[in-house]
Amino acid sequence: MELLNAIKQRHSVRSYLDKPIDTDVRDELRKYIDKCNQEGNLHIQLIENEPQAFAKGLFHYGLFSNVKNYIALVGKEDSTFDERCGYYGEKIVLKAQMLGLNTCWVGGTYKKIESVVDLKPGEKFLMVIAIGYGENQGRE
Ligand SMILES: Cc1cc2nc3c(=O)[nH]c(=O)nc-3n(C[C@H](O)[C@H](O)[C@H](O)COP(=O)(O)O)c2cc1C
């Protein structure tokens, strides 16, 4: 999928299939995240098979279903940290779309499970992007 098509097609998805990310897709996504991390001096991580951050009953607003994978936006904080997370986070969202995955930015309505994130000294875990195969994929 071309980038322009990904931009047109991408929309937030809150309900996901209970399906792990395909190995080849995951490898390509991880490679892309590594590239973004190098370019943007960030430590963004793909967390897979972790159901606690979006466990049922945590919030009444912003409901999600079956989120087991997410991207943790992590890095050393400075005056451009938020902006770099936004810029590279959106690049990763569009790459995910091109790989057939769906996404949703989530800044508040999730539980921070710090034990699954590799947080180096001085790094901040800003927010997450839910990622996976959307429930309505192929039917929209
Ligand atoms: C930076 C950011 C943080 C967000 N945080 C949350 C959140 O904590 N909970 C939530 O339900 N939606 C959150 N959203 C909203 C959704 O990601 C999404 O933008 C919204 O559902 C609209 O979907 P659409 O862009 O496809 O129209 C956030 C959006 C952004 C850009």
Image (spheres, rainbow, N blue to C red):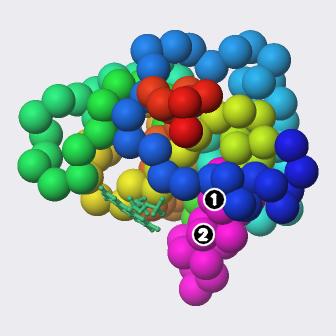
In this rendering, the answer to whether 72 lies above or below 127 is above
Q: The N terminus is located in which quarter?
A: top right
Residue 133, position as x, y percentages in the image: 56, 27
In this rendering, the answer to whether 18 lies above or below 116 is above
Residue located at (45% from left, 27% from top): 135
Viewer-side residue, 3 vs 87: 3
Amino acid found under the numbered disc labelled 1: Gly
Left or right: where 69 falls relative to 35: left
Residue under label 1, please give it: 89
Q: The C terminus is located in which quarter?
A: top right
The answer to whether mark 1 is within 8 Å of ligand 1 is no
Residue 32, position as x, y percentages in the image: 82, 43
* Quadrant location, ligand no. 1: bottom left
Cβ atoms at labels 2 and 1 below 8 Å apart: yes
Residue 80 makes an appearance in the image:
yes
The answer to whether mark 2 is within 8 Å of ligand 1 is yes
In this rendering, the answer to whether 45 lies above or below 104 is above
Magenta-drawn segment? 77-93
Tell me the element at label 1: helix
Which residue is the extreme one toward the front?
A: 139
Magenta stretch holds residue 16: no
Amino acid found under the numbered disc labelled 2: Gly
Residue 25, position as x, y percentages in the image: 77, 24
Magenta stretch holds residue 78: yes
Residue located at (28% from left, 59% from top): 108
Q: Magenta span: helix, strand or loop, mainly? A: helix
Residue under label 2, please give it: 86
Viewer-side residue, 114 vs 12: 12
Cα separation, mark 2 vs mark 1, equals: 5 Å
Which quadrant of the figure has residue 89?
A: bottom right
